[in-house]
Amino acid sequence: MEKLLISACLLGVNCKYNGKNNYNPLIEELKKKYELIPICPEVMGGLSIPRDPSEIKGDLVISNKGNDVTSNYLSGAYQALQLVGISNITKAVLKDGSPSCGSTYIYDGTFTKNKINGMGITAKLLKENNIIIYNENEIERLL
Ligand code: SF4
């Protein structure tokens, strides 16, 4: 069975910044076709659940309290890259809008819910390394 990297919150894991998840019922269909390999780059990078929400600002990731959490985000991203390398994974389904997992949009760094085109730190690193990224609205393309 082909392996597919997936944002753990889409599987129903309560790893979001607010301690909740982004469960998507289409995951049950994906499970029939792929071996799902869950990641949460923010937790892998050492951040807690719950944690302060953060947004990308230039080259940095900053929490809503002004803390620089860039190193945590980079650590999670590089661990995800290492995982796809050792597991021969070529595709990932990642939660859009996240400063880690976002693939088509992120928030603009002002904590005003304003969306901009862009990618999260992990999604960008994986894409740069030839992993094909799908978001939760594109799952049907994999079924
Ligand atoms: Fe979900 Fe990714 Fe955020 Fe973790 S970092 S909660 S997997 S969107």
Image: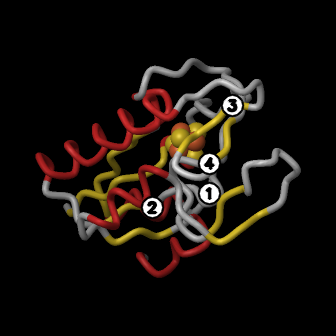
- From the top left corner, tell me how far across and down residue 95 is, in percent: 57, 55
Query: Is residue 96 toward the left or the right of residue 41 in the image?
Result: right
Separation of disc 4 and disc 1 at Cα?
A: 29 Å
- From the top left corner, tell me how far across and down residue 81 is, in percent: 25, 48
Q: Amino acid at mark 3?
A: Ser
Q: Amino acid at mark 4?
A: Ile
Taking the view exactly as shown, the residue that stands out farthest to the right is 112
Residue where numbered disc 3 is placed:
63
In this view, 106 is above or below 56: below
Tell me whether circle 4 and circle 2 mark residues in contact (CB < 8 Å). Answer: no
Q: Amino acid at mark 2?
A: Val
Question: Which comes sooner in the sequence, label 4 or label 2?
Answer: 4
Q: Quadrant of ligand 1?
A: top right
Tell me whether circle 4 and circle 1 mark residues in contact (CB < 8 Å). Answer: no
Residue where numbered disc 1 is placed:
25
Element carrying mark 1: loop
Image quadrant in which the N terminus is located: bottom left
Q: Nearer the viewer, mark 2 or mark 1?
A: 2
Q: Nearer the viewer, residue 74 or 139?
A: 74
Separation of disc 4 and disc 3 at Cα?
A: 9 Å
Separation of disc 3 and disc 1 at Cα?
A: 30 Å
**Dot label at residue 56:** 4
Residue where numbered disc 2 is placed:
93
Taking the view exactly as shown, the residue that stands out farthest to the bottom is 141
Query: Is residue 36 toward the left or the right of residue 19 in the image?
Result: left
Question: Which comes sooner in the sequence, label 4 or label 3?
Answer: 4
Query: Is residue 119 toward the left or the right of residue 2 in the image?
Result: right
Element carrying mark 2: strand
Element carrying mark 3: strand
Question: Which comes sooner in the sequence, label 3 or label 1?
Answer: 1
